[in-house]
Image: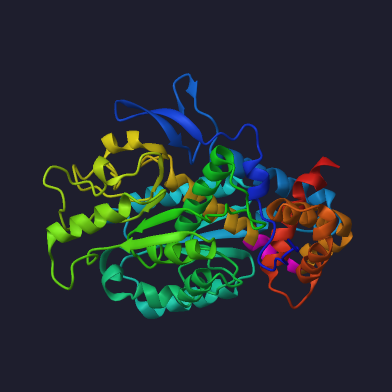
Amino acid sequence: MAYREYNARIGGINHWLFAQEDFDHIISRPFRGEQYDKVINGSGVVKGEQKYPKGFQDVIIPELKKRADFFGEIPALKAIKTTESKVLTVLVGDKDDPKVAASRSYVGMKSATTKLSGLSSMVEELPSMITPHEMYEKLDMWNKDSSIAILMFQLPFGGRAGQIIDTTTLCNRINTTKDGDGLNQVTLGLMSLGAERYYDCCTPSGMLDLASVYLYRERGIRLRPDGIASFAGLEVLVSGRSAIVGEPLFNMLKRFDATVLGPLHTRTGSGGSIDKKTQARVYTELSQRADIIFSCMGFHPYKIHSDTEYFFTSDMLKEGCLIIDAATSFRKDGKRPYGDVEPTARSKAAAYTLETGGVGPATVTKLVHQGWRGMLYQNIEKVRKALEDNQAIVKSTFSKLLASYAQVSETEAEENAEKLYQRAIHPESHPVHAVDALEAIFPELMAK
């Protein structure tokens, strides 16, 4: 078969990440008094004397710091001061507002993780009485501030601001070169189309990473040149259709050759009217087919089972399926998060994520990583110069990635690698290609 030229993104950090011997995402883990095995790990958790195998955060964040420290060894990059690049999070709500207490805790976690990666974290706390005009003025200032790599609004806003500020309109005014949360609708649209873009929406992207490493490590599925596993031949179910998780995830999966079922939502199988029995039948028929379930419904105000509040029950799952559950709701006691999948149903899965330590840490890690990439976007001329200085390594790396995916010799992929290298260094090409390439060659640069 003749070699088929590849022209999508190539490189990134996943090829390095998935090859790490100390990164084992499948763990046994006690959770709420029960012992679970086959858990997909988003973070390395330490409980007492037992240390679980490393997850995304425990591997990627220290690696980003190592790479940042190594800039001084790369002539074209040595002038970059990573600590001068800020990841800005904007929190709106008064300190005594219990509605933003969870957001404040989450922001603190993001801030600490950002600093561990070598970047600076900045949190801007604004009162709940801030007006839309005042907020837009501040956003314009942040968009123009060259020291800010990415900026994110912690949603929802508290108090009066949460009632009078249209956060969709606000997020659409974030400069796409700084939209690290992927909430600008331009970013969301480009991501859904598979088009060139600076960032991805963090949660669906993190979910794809978790599924990819399982498919690559456990099932031997080849990685695409962009570091995502091929979903060809797999039936994949998406439950939930939110604008920032379910919908973009559904569209992204199509780009990776999945046969996508769903997305499931409140009107699936209803025929325009609420028929619980018909809905339950359709939900079950689709979910029983799925090799992989990406669940992101969260709290659902419709009850399809008489004996449980969970959406997915054991009879709905295919034996040996993969479950990536991003749902987090507090519907039982208002304190602890619960997912979409009934705990007793997990025994049917080959692997699964839990409500904590799975998708959440992968999302935060993705966000911090995008802040790190934002710092490179701000120095894109230096990045392209570093690629030119290491032309042979870039071409060799590209040839290996292309050959591995197409299952051909590296010689057959060399011409394609040359074209992709030229695209990465071209001053008018999208900066994402240069940053992907730099991330791909870092391991070899650091080993020299």
- Residue 219, percent across and down? 55, 40
- Relative vertical location of residue 336 with respect to residue 140 in this rendering, above or below: above
Main secondary structure along the magenta-highlighted residues: helix
227 or 95: nearer the eye?
A: 227
Position in image of residue 128 (x %, y %): 31, 66
- Could you tell me if residue 92 is visible in this image? no
Q: From what the image shows, is residue 72 above or below residue 424? A: above
Q: Residue at x 82, y 59 (%)?
A: 412
Q: Residue furthest top?
A: 49
Q: Residue at x 53, y 63 (%)?
A: 200
Q: Nearer the viewer, residue 22 or 129?
A: 22
Above or below residue 339? Residue 264 is below
The residue most toward the bottom is: 133
Q: Residue at x 49, y 48 (%)?
A: 211
Residue 295 pos. (x, y %): 35, 52
Residue 377: say if magenta.
yes
Can residue 87 be seen from the camera position used here?
yes
Locate residue 15 relative to residue 37 in the image: left or right: right
Q: Residue at x 77, y 51 (%)?
A: 400
Within the image, what quadrant is residue 213 found in? Answer: top right
Q: How is the image coloured?
A: rainbow
- Lateral position of residue 404 relative to residue 197, left or right: right
What segment carries the magenta color? 374-380
Nearer to me, 285 or 102: 285
